[in-house]
Image (cartoon, helix red, strand yellow):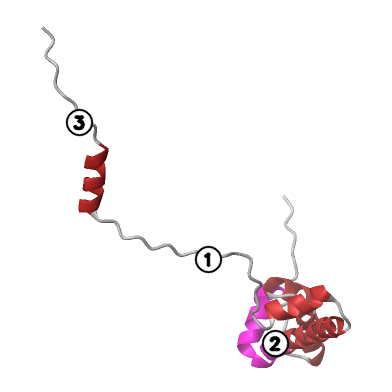
Amino acid sequence: MTFLSIPFSPRELKATESRLQAIYDAAKLGLKNDSLALAAGMMPSEYRQLCQIDPVAEMAAQKGKADGEKEMAQHLVAAAREGDAKSALAVLQHVHGWTAKTEISVDVYQKISITQALQEAQSRVIEGTVVDNE
């Protein structure tokens, strides 16, 4: 039986400029959590550790997300201003919380009286006579 030796050298976790840029770029594309870490060239556990060690890494992800969202919002608003109805509707719905009326609400309130229900039931009963069959 042959034993293989796998060399192990722990990777140093530092928020270097290139690593922060990779985090920023991945977050700007909309990636989150494990996908963000992998796209930035880190293992998910390394990314979580780096965010705990150096808050600048988490700030790079937040800044990337904000810049990506801003860029897409600018495109959406520009399209809406140019007459794109779907873009305008998307801005109204998602930014301003607008919803179109699609249903009619009808409220019916009726109080049911037990005594009245019994009286109505009694009036529907057909009075019969007992016939004696001999």
The structure residue drawn at horizontal position 65% and vertical position 74%, both measured from the top left corner, is 99
Quarter of the image for residue 54 reads bottom right
Residue 31 occupies which quadrant of the picture?
Answer: bottom right
In the picture of the structure, the residue carrying the numbered disc 3 is 127
Is residue 29 placed above or below 14 in the rendered structure? above
Front residue of this view, candidates 111 and 25? 111
Name the N-terminal-most of marks 1 and 2: 2
- Quadrant location of the C terminus in the rendered image: top left
Q: Is residue 115 magenta?
A: no
Q: Amino acid at mark 2?
A: Gln
Element marked by disc 2: helix
Can residue 41 be seen by looking at this rendering? Answer: no
Neighbour class for label 1 at 10 Å: few (<14), some, many (≥20)? few
**Magenta segment boundaries in residue numbering:** 40-62
Give the label, 2 or 3, closer to the camera: 3
Which label is found at residue 62? 2
Query: Number of labelled discs?
Result: 3
Residue type, numbered disc 3: Glu
Residue type at tag 1: Ser
Within 10 Å of disc 2 (Cα), the crowding (few <14, some 14-19, many 20+) is some
In the image, is 123 to the left or to the right of 73? left
Disc with the residue nearer the chain's start (3 vs 1): 1
Visible residue check, residue 70: yes
Secondary structure found at label 3: loop
Q: Position of residue 126 (x, y in %)?
A: 24, 32
User: Residue 93: x and y, percent?
Assistant: 69, 77
> Which residue is the site of mark 1?
105
Q: Give left or right: position of 17 versus 110.
A: right
